[in-house]
Amino acid sequence: MKNFTTTIGRLASQTGGSDREDYQKAIKAWRMLQEVVPTETENGRMSYGIVQQVICMASNGAFTYGGQGNKNPDFYYGELWGETKSFKRNQSTAHVAASAFQASNSSVPKHRELLQECPKKAKKFLFEKSYDKNDIYCLTGNGKVGDTILDLEEVELIICQKELLVECLLESTNFKEVDIELLRERVGEQEC
């Protein structure tokens, strides 16, 4: 799989996904939701599954929807497991570790304990629970930025192999965040 950056709309145009009736209906429905209940489309927890399914439609079958949780990946690329994470367009980093490592979720206490005892064990624990099971990542630039309402087709996508994402993780965040600018730069080098 090639690493690349694009938008949902460009992906749809390039793959023929924009001709799919389900894609066209999903974009129209999203725009209606933005008008009627904008807070729901700006909320990552509320829109996460919808955005993932639209990306799969835009890919015209290259990506297939896996589900949210339940021991399935967010999406498949052939036999490869894919994970989707959103980022805010005005920030230079994004949390890409499993959601269990956010705020005070289930893996945070053990991770903190391991960081105090042995940082190498903490990193191993984080990677086992977050990165090891995935093959590719799709980072979506649809995180809320102020009052800006972004058209779904304009959402930036950074699609990369896990190994490249891992190379761009920040040690200063205990490997829970990726340097978005560095990742874009590294993906751009490979696109040429």
Image: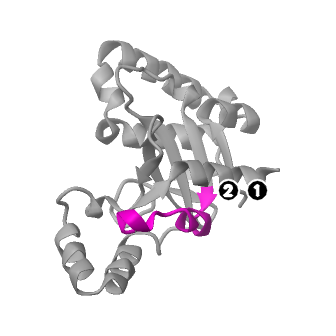
> Do the CB atoms of the residues marked 2 and 1 lie less than 8 Å apart?
yes
Is residue 122 placed above or below 180 in the rendered structure? below
Q: Is residue 116 left or right of residue 136?
A: left
Secondary structure, magenta segment, majority class: helix
* Snapshot quadrant of residue 34: top left
Q: Name the residue furthest front.
A: 172
User: According to the image, label 2 marks what residue?
Assistant: 186
Residue in the foreground of this view, choosing between 76 and 99: 99
Is 192 located above or below residue 109 in the figure? Answer: above
Residue at the limit of the structure toward the top, as seen here: 35
Residue position for label 1: 190
Q: Is residue 43 above or below residue 138?
A: above
The residue range painted magenta reads: 160-174
Residues 99 and 68: in front is: 99
Residue 17 coordinates in the image, percent (x, y): 67, 34
Name the residue at 72% across, 31% down: 13
Mark 1 closeness class: few <14, some 14–19, many ≥20 residues within 10 Å? few
Q: Is residue 172 magenta?
A: yes
